[in-house]
Amino acid sequence: MIVQAICFYLFAAITVASGVMVIASRNPVHSVLFLILAFFNAAGLFVLMGAEFLALILVIVYVGAVAVLFLFVVMMLNIDFVELRQGFLQYLPVGVVIGIVLFVELLLIFGAWVVAPDVAKSIAAPTPSPTTVTNTVALGQLLYTRYVYVFQAAGMILLVAMVGAIVLTLRAREGVRKQDIARQVGRRRAETLEIVKVRPRQGV
Amino acid sequence: MGNLLQGYVVPGAVMIGEILVIVVPVLIAIAYLTYAERKVLAWAQIRKGPNVVGPFGLWQPFADGLKLLLKETVIPSGANRVVFIAAPILSFGLSLLAWAVIPFSNGVVLANINVGILYLFAISSLGVYGIVMAGWSSNSKYAFLGALRSAAQMVSYEVSMGFVIVSVLLCAGSLNLTDIVLAQRKIWYCIPLLPMFIVFFVSVLAETNRSPFDLPEGESELVAGFFVEYSAMAFALFYLGEYGSMILMSAMTAILFLGGWLAPFNIEPFTGLGAHLWGGFWFALKVAFVLFCFLWVRATMPRFRYDQLMRLGWKVFLPLSLFWLVLTAGVLVGMGWLPT
């Protein structure tokens, strides 16, 4: 138990510290690297809670794909964060309000557990205890069986968003020479080759 | 005091011992993979390869290692020091980290976790960070170009690799690597899922930055790509990391498609008690076969052009693996073969 507690405080402390460093470091690439560290330690916290599936999905999706793209963009664009910080005080009230709203919501959720412990039993589809099924099975039953329509709707929304993003950025540029493999493979000798008999001293 | 000894010190020592038992052979295997690569390439090109240091040149990997260890590590003046030094360590560390979940034989595994395959996939998708960090912190154009190429390449091929893994999972009905191997007792998945096996092998080549997808290094255009500024042991760590992840990915291929430690035929002495003794042997043989294919491809194929690489990943492999995934699911449900 002591090891578990030590691990928890270690992961939690590193998560919070690297979260602070994400917004505090001057170099944007360092910010992204600290963000990755924060993701990692959050995954560690998930493992401590027995949610190993979520932990690894966090690493695969956020660290393995999303943060790579972040890093890619930040490295390519050379964003000047000092310039971005210019309007910091101006936007501070909005940020504080959002923070307070999120904090109050979290308080309400966790407060409900403390004030009325029975509230957890009234959930429509309670998660089975981790000792009876693996959490992959538990998540699968929840997402693909009980809430399958909501899940599909979320998927559709994401698909539409993706198509929208592609449509917005798609442009047909002039003068770009692209390899058309079907045309390359499909062309015949007669279309491209012409055999010319060159007579001496006359040229083509 | 005795409680502390029993509760923490003894299990900790056992754990470190187990880790060493896995890591030391892996390091030796990495050393001899470099030797094997040079020998196989030499045979392919009708040369002799390393044959001076020791009998048949067998001490060559150690001579190379010693040489690199004794050289000076140069850090470029414009480099971002911390990231520059962290990159090779990360690269090498990640290639060793994943061995924790590889089952070498029935029950012979350091951590038999329920989501082993996801763990492997997560670790392999992290390999890109070593490369990107190296390329960015070197403060060099060639290194940076190599890093950008590798980031785009690895993210692209991971998608189809994910679909391949999901179709294997559908057939096996478990995320546990031991269960996946045991589910192949009737038939190895490389036969019913042959197109997926090929897609996976090619994606693995792209994921480990091996020829014909070695564009991040691309010595003919980018000098040495992302590790152009590295020297001595830092360079050696990248090298070891690359070969380590080659062996790891071969092990993953063997587990997912070639039946892991299972013997190819069910006759004595490979059944019953013999299965336990021979398991490691068959596993090593399969890994060696996949590794030989890596080297064989390198000796045979020219390097892809970058747009061709992207086209293959997004326009060929992604639709193919998605289609095959739906087909696999359809057949399993339709025939009632879904594992419970």
Image: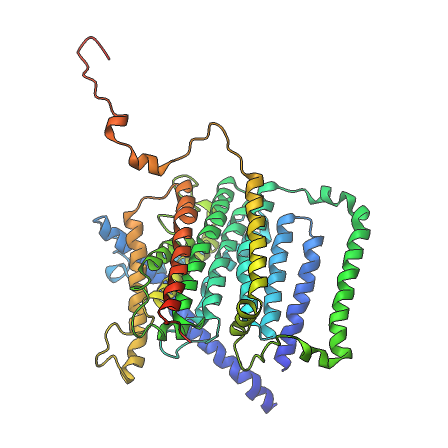
Is B227 placed left or right of A27 in the picture? left
Q: Is residue B236 above or below residue A167?
A: below
- Front residue of A109/B307: it is A109
For the point 49% across and 42% down, the residue is B145
Q: Is residue B312 above or below residue B241?
A: above
- Front residue of B38/A34: it is A34
Q: Looking at the picture, how far across and down is residue B305, in whole percent?
A: 39, 41
Q: Looking at the picture, how far across and down is residue A157, in whole percent?
A: 59, 53
For the point 77% across and 59% down, the residue is A99
- Front residue of A200/A136: it is A136
Is A110 placed left or right of B113 in the picture? right
Residue B47 visible in the snapshot: yes
Is B22 placed left or right of A155 in the picture? left
Q: Looking at the picture, how far across and down is residue A177, in whole percent?
A: 42, 31
Quarter of the image containing the C terminus of chain B?
Answer: bottom left
Quarter of the image containing the N terminus of chain B?
Answer: bottom right
Is B22 placed left or right of B263 in the picture? right
